[in-house]
Image (cartoon, rainbow, N blue to C red):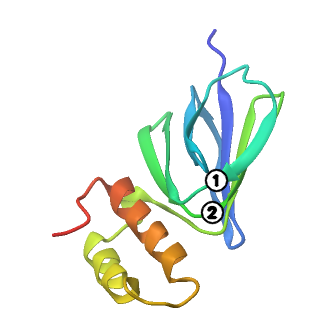
Amino acid sequence: MSKKLTLEIATPKGTLVEGVEVAGVEVPGALGEIGILPEHEAFCGPVAPGVARFVGDDGPRRVAVGTGYFEVTGEGLVRVLVDRAVAAEEIDPGAVRARLADVEGSEDEGAARDAAFLRAQLRAKGVAEQA
């Protein structure tokens, strides 16, 4: 019997992934991608805007995530708590590109954070940034 992790991805607006058993998960950390496998030591760390990847019972999945934190418990639970997240299958690349064009070049304090999340959405969808 192979060991599995239980994955949760949540935002302040709700839980996007809950109780999904996975063989492993990749989380975009502040210093690069973090691969987490069963029996990993308990720890936590920061999440950077990017793409969380995992394989559930329904196949490979990608979720664009914003900033936040992740936690790995000694019981095999991986909890990703981020300010925003969207599943790849829900992303409209045209709408994302239009929004990205609006925020790029802006000197608004949150524009860089917004642009990073929008780029993560395009990567999660598997499309190029420019059409």
Q: Residue 74: image x %, image y %?
A: 84, 28
> Residue beneath label 2, please?
67
Residue at image x 73%, y 46%? 45
- Identity of the amino acid at label 2? Thr
Residue at image x 48%, y 90%? 107
Bin the neighbour count of mark 2 within 10 Å (Cα to Cα): few under 14, some 14-19, many 20 and up.
Answer: many
Determine whether the residue tagged by mark 1 lies in a helix, strand or loop. strand
Quadrant in which the C terminus appears: bottom left
Answer whether labels 1 and 2 touch (C-beta < 8 Å).
yes
> Residue beneath label 1, please?
47
- Identity of the amino acid at label 1? Val
The quarter of the picture where residue 94 lies is bottom left
Residue at image x 81%, y 31%? 42
Q: Real-space Cα distance between discs 1 and 2?
A: 5 Å
Q: Residue 26: image x %, image y %?
A: 54, 38
Placement of 49 over or under 70, stated as above or below: below
Residue at image x 72%, y 23%? 40
Res. 17 mark: none
The quarter of the picture where residue 124 lies is bottom left
